[in-house]
Structures are given as C-alpha cells and as structure tokens.
C-alpha cells in the first residue's frame, strides 16, 4: 500500500486523541466542493509513501501518539486498507476512518474484526437520489446510493464512536435539506455541520461563491438538534 501523505501529529483530526493522519489516494465521487482534489487521481510525478515507512514511524511513536486517522480521497477504495489497519492495531493504536460510506460490506468486516474505534461518515445531501447525485458531482450510481444508505443504518447501530458530517454549500443545500439529513440520521451521537471553503473547491464554478454565515449555521444546528444527541459547527 502506498499513501499520498502523512501528518505526523494532529490534535484536530481525531477528537480527544493525538493522532497521525494518513492520506489515501483515489475516490469514487467527484464532489464539486472537494478540497482534496489532488488526492483523487494518480500521482503526477514523485513517489507515494510506502506503508512500511509509515509502520516504522508508528512503531517509534508508540506511547506518544494515541491514534491513526485514515482519510483521503476515499480510504475504503484501497484494497490494502484492511491489512494496513490490522498491522496498525497490532502496534496498539486506536483507528479512526473518514469515509463517504460507499463500501458498507467493508465497514461490516472492519467492525467485526474490531479494527475501528471511530468512524466519521460524510452525508453529502438529503437522502434523495437527485440531491445526492448533484452533491457527488454526478458520479453516483444507484448502487452507490444504496450503499450510502446502508452505511448510515449500519453506523447508527455500531458500538463505536460515530460522527456524521456534512460540508454545507449554499447552492447544494438549503437549511431544510440539512434538517432532512439530521432526520435521516436520527439517534446519531454527533452531527457536524462543516463550512465549505469556496477558494479550494474542485469545481471552478464554486470558487468565489458565497457561504452561509455563523447565524445561518446556528439556525441549522437548532433545526437538527431534535434528531441527534449533539450538533457541532466547524467553520
Ligand atoms: S469530498 Fe467527495 S470527491 Fe472529495 S474525497 Fe470526499 S468523497 Fe471524494
């Protein structure tokens, strides 16, 4: 397995833990607001980071770092993810996975094997195919949509910490849509409403467009509050 990059220590990517962050390459979606578009395709020049080097680093940092975060791109697209997690677990680390939820069978396997301690799943739109299709940049099969729905149901029942989150883009999400998402994840422990950064958007048509204000976010948080245990705003 080769990784696109690493942050050697972070206090913000794994709530409550000091963690290394590993970036995988490749994604099955093309969200227009994606700010990691450089991770979606094969590397142009240079070399990726071999997993062996990362494991050696993690071995050295045992007792200093608490956890490891897999993010991307979409980590579950990588066929070697499971084995990488097995080796990282053997070193004693907690593991957090950031995912778009399109591979529920793999999530089941990782959960059954005790390889996950925390999952943060993006819920990109209200659970309506047309809305989800737009939020994924038109790169969404009906199978993918079913998979996303299955991942939500699976994670709502999972015995680990689960966070659902939405990057909120005014041209894709009305405030009512955000309430509908909260309703679709009813009972969740944490729903994060995340600000969108237009200047880094993959779709150049979104660059320079307006974003919701702090007051708008607070209004959306209030709309979501009846459905989930906690709503968090990240700006
Ligand atoms: S924002 Fe969308 S396109 Fe970008 S990595 Fe996440 S799922 Fe893939």
Image (cartoon, helix red, strand yellow):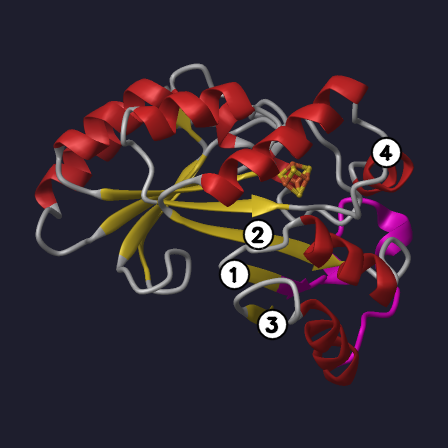
In the displayed structure, would residue 182 be above or below residue 67? below
Q: Is 148 placed left or right of 117 in the picture?
A: right
Numbered disc 2: secondary structure: strand
In the rendered image, residue 222 lying in the magenta stretch gets the answer no
Depth-wise, is mark 3 or mark 1 nearer the camera?
1
According to the picture, the residue beneath numbered tag 2 turns out to be: 164
CB contact under 8 Å: marks 3 and 1: no
In this rendering, would 138 be left or right of 155?
Answer: right
Q: Which residue is mark 1?
A: 190
Judged from the image, the quadrant occupied by ligand 1 is top right
Q: Are marks 2 and 1 in contact (CB under 8 Å)?
A: yes
Q: Quadrant of residue 23?
A: top left
Residue plotted at (32% across, 44% down): 117
The span shown in magenta is 193-213
In-front residue for pair 203/224: 224
Pointer 4 residue: 129
Label 3 packing within 10 angstroms: few (<14), some (14-19), many (20+)? some
Mark with earlier residue (4, 2): 4
Q: Which mark is residue 215?
A: none
Return the residue at label 3: 233
98 lies left or right of 112: right
Q: Quarter of the image containing the N terminus?
A: top left
Which residue is rendered at x = 46% and y = 21% of the image? 106
User: For disc 4, does the CB lie below 8 Å from ligand 1?
Assistant: no
Alpha-carbon distance for marks 4 and 2? 18 Å
How far apart marks 3 and 1 lie (CA) works out to 11 Å
Measured as percent of width and height from the top left, residue 35 is found at 66, 49
Foreground of the two, 218 or 222: 222
Question: Who comes first in sequence, dot 3 or dot 1?
Answer: 1
Which quadrant of the view contains residue 192?
A: bottom right
């Amino acid at each position: 397995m080769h990784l696109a990059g690493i942050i050697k220590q972070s206090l913000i990517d794994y709530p409550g833990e000091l963690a290394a962050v590993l970036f995988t390459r490749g994604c099955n979606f093309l969200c227009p607001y994606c700010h990691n578009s450089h991770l979606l395709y094969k590397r142009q020049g240079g070399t990726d980071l071999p997993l062996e080097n990362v494991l050696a680093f993690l071995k050295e940092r045992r007792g200093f770092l608490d956890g490891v975060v897999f993010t991307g791109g979409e980590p579950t697209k990588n066929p070697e993810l499971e084995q990488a997690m097995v080796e990282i677990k053997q070193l004693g680390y907690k593991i957090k996975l950031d995912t778009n939820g399109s591979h529920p069978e793999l999530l089941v396997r990782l959960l059954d094997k005790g390889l996950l301690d925390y999952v943060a799943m993006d819920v990109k739109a209200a659970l309506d195919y047309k809305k989800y299709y737009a939020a994924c940049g038109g790169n969404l099969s009906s199978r993918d949509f079913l998979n996303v729905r299955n991942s939500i149901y699976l994670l709502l029942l999972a015995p680990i910490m689960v966070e659902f989150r939405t990057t909120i883009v005014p041209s894709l999400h009305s405030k009512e849509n955000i309430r509908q998402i909260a309703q679709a994840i009813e009972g969740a422990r944490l729903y994060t409403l995340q600000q969108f950064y237009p200047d880094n958007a993959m779709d150049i048509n979104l660059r320079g467009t307006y974003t919701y204000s702090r007051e708008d976010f607070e209004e959306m948080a209030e709309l979501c509050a009846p459905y989930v245990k906690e709503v968090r705003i990240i700006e």
